[in-house]
Structure formats: structure tokens, C-alpha cells
Amino acid sequence: MTAEERIKGRKIGVVGMARSGMAAAKLARRYGGFPFVSDAAPSVKLHTRTKELSEVGIPFETDGHTERLLKCDYLVLSPGVPLTIDILRQAVQNGIPCFSELEFASWLCSGPIVAVTGSNGKTTTTALLGEIFTAAGFDTHLCGNIGLPLAEVVERITERSIAVVEVSTFQLETIADFRPHVAVILNLTPDHLDRHGTFEKYKEIKYRVTENQTVDDYLILNREDAETMADNPETEAARLYFSTAERNGAASYVENEVLYAGVKDQPVPVIRCEEIALPGPHNLQNVSAATVVARLFDIDVAVITDVLRSFAGVEHRLENVGTVAGVKFVNDSKATNVDAVCYALKSVKEPVCLICGGRDKGGSYAPIVDAGRDRLKGLVVIGEAREKIFDALGRAFPVQFAVDLEEAVEKGFEMAVPGETVLLSPGCSSFDMFANYEERGRTFKLAVRALKESKNSDEKISR
């Protein structure tokens, strides 16, 4: 059955009116399907979305999911919708297939897919690959968790295009035929345990990225990631490894502070590590992984080198947002798990006042003790997880509470002295206080800007 035949004339329930759900519904409509969109949120919060659906003639419901979804041939789920909600439990019991938006859109993807997953570094590596492919002259489409849903761009992807897709467990949980030509698993640490229950289940879902790959495809793994190497995930794809240490069979590796790559030929030097614009040892792993992917597509080493010298990272990931009275502020709102916080602490050279907290995801905060030793001056905690964080870290570091991010910025500034850094690296999801990590990061930057203006004003008055 062709992709078009899987859509045309079918009754397709789309669960969730977020961007991916909206894109899937419109895509289904354009290919002759009969989409119906359902969202549990109240209509007053979805006015813009429902107006948009009405304008293109797509029926919908709000304020809860009804049995109308159970009359569909299959359901397409937005990433934020868990399989545990009642209507989806009923759908599964009734034998109604449930697919992620990623799975649904991939049916129509004409070009090769590079899928990047892992616990940390996905967005940075995906964005870096986008820069490399674009610089090499490819028709490149960046999508998935990084911004645009695959369903929103898939019709522009041809056989000569490259789709670089950031992939999460929320999307992989409900795939069926999704098959990337190249799959990258950057690393695995406990994350999203509030949704998946156990680390083992989380890893199992991550490994689904390779379950449909064939001998013509590639799975790229981190030679230094203990979990991945111990699990040795099953695959028919050719395995390639990246490393930041000695070669040891890796397709990219570091020797004498130089990154080398040898995928289809003898290893050649790519760049001196000190020349790489991305800061931090964890980003060296991301660079190493991206280099393997680029060489698989025969991208010239000189192109890779030029991009690595200029690409300084993505918004909300170790983003320097300014200095106030000698105190630097860094926005790492994308750090939504504890390992990401540890990476951030190791990447900042100055003493750090850490702002963290949000909605707890089920992991332990204890690793921050070792990562912050000799560099973490104190913490300001916010959100639902603040008590749990205090219990875990309060004996090791001074901890202050703040009611919101604006107050946390002020308290962090008061705690720091010139030459030190106030780092927002939450280690939690944003959903208790913000719509997403982007909104949290923007709020932080606005608070820093307001603080800077206030201090400048005070300085003028004192003069």
C-alpha cells in the first residue's frame, strides 16, 4: 500500500492541537483523508487553532476527547499526548492503531532521513548538521523536536533533499514503519521517567529509532556512552561509532587535541579542538557525531571544518545573554534533565550561581553535587521540584527559594560577585510555570535585561 493509499479516504483522528497535530491534520486533508482533531483543553484557550481548522473545513472538538475518536481508522498523536489517557486506552483495546505525527509524516517523505536522538545534545547536533548540510549545498530540512514538525515540511522534501530530524521518545513510542537512513543515538541517561516509568523502558523506546533500519542504513553510536555500549542495541544497520578519545574502532575520534574522521577512507584531520566554536566537553561529542554523519554523505572535510569554526550553538543552550555589573548570565533553559545540568556546570569556567527547578521528571539530583564541586557557589530553586532539589542538595550548597524566574534572577545576581556566572540550567521540564523551555528561556532573558536596565538607571542616579 502506498503512502497516499494509507491516507486517502481514511477517517483519521488527530489527538492534540499543538503545532504537530495541526500540521498532521492539514497534511491528511491535502492527501484526501478525513481528519478530525480532538483536544482536551478548553475552547477558550484554543480559539486561534479552532478558527484555523474551521477555515480549512476540518472538524474538531475541544474540552475533552469523545468516542468520536473511536470511529476513526487510526489516530495520529501529538508528542505531548501520553498513551495512558482513557481515550487512547480504549482505542488500543478496540484495535485502533495509534501513530505519532513523525510516523504519519514519514510515510510521505521522499528523501533520506537523518534521525538524531539521545538524552542530551539532540538539538545542538541536529542544528549543527543542518548548518553542515546547507553549507555543502544540500536542500536541507530541519524538523522534529527542533521546531517545525515533519508533517509541516515533508511535501517540500524531494529525493535530493536531506531531512535532519530531532527525535524524542514521545515520538518513537508510537512508530510502526519509521525508517531513517542514518540514526544517531548520542547518549542515554535517565529522563522522562515521569512518563515512561523506568530507565529500561526509556532506553527500549530510544532504540526503536533503529528497529526498521536495513543493511543499507547506518546506526551511529557513542563509543563512550556506557549504557549504549552495554546494551548493544539490535540492528540490521551498519554500526559506526564516534568518540572524543582514542580511535578504538571509532569513525571519528580525538588524538593530540585534533578531531579525526575516517568513515569511508583513511582517517584525516578535521579540526583542532581549540578551534571548535561550541563550548564544553559534551559538545565535542556532538561535533564528533555530526562529523561521522557528514562524512557518510561525502561532505568535504574543508566544509565541515569551516562550519565547526563558526557554529556557536543554539538559543537556550549555554547562551550568553549579557553581563550586569560584571556578573555574566547564561541561558541553558534547554537543560531539562540532571545530566544536562552537569554538562553545563562543567562547561562554565567561572564560579556559578545556579538557577534550577521546574516540574520534576523522576530522576535524582544527586549527580549535581559532584559536578558542582569547587565551582557551584549556590543555588536558587523554583517551581514544583524546589523542595526535592533542596532535600538533595541543601547540605552540599547554599540554597535559596524564589517564587518565579524574575525573583530567581535577582537572587542569583545578589549571590554572585563580578567575574562569576549566574546560570539558568533547570534540570526539569518547564510545564509547571511555562508553555515550553523556549518561553522559560525568553523570560530569563527579559529578566536579565530588566535587571541590567535597573542597574544602569541606579548608576546614573548615583552619579
Image (cartoon, grey):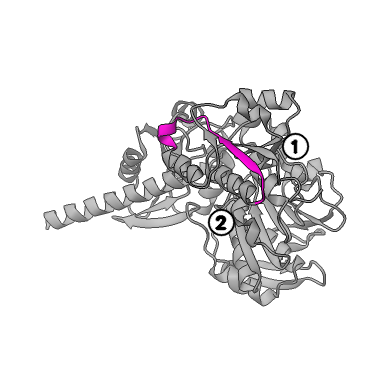
Number of the label disc, if any, that sits on residue 204: 1
Residue 270 among magenta residues? no
The residue type indicated by label 2 comes to: Gly
Number of the label disc, if any, that sits on residue 457: none
User: Where is residue 119 shown, x and y percent of the image?
Assistant: 64, 44
Decide: is 61 above or below 274.
Answer: above
Q: Earlier in the sequence, mark 1 or mark 2?
A: 1
Left or right: 209 with respect to 453? right
Q: Secondary structure at mark 1?
A: helix
The residue type indicated by label 1 comes to: Glu
The residue segment tinted magenta is 31-46
Q: Alpha-carbon distance for marks 1 and 2?
A: 29 Å
User: Where is residue 396 shown, x and y percent of the image?
Assistant: 48, 33
The residue at the point 72 percent across, 32 percent down is 201
The residue at the point 18 percent across, 54 percent down is 457
Decide: is 281 above or below 356.
Answer: below
Q: Which residue is mark 2?
A: 280
Q: Secondary structure at mark 2?
A: loop
Nearer to the camera, 413 or 6: 6
Left or right: 372 with respect to 305? left
Nearer to the camera, 298 or 306: 298
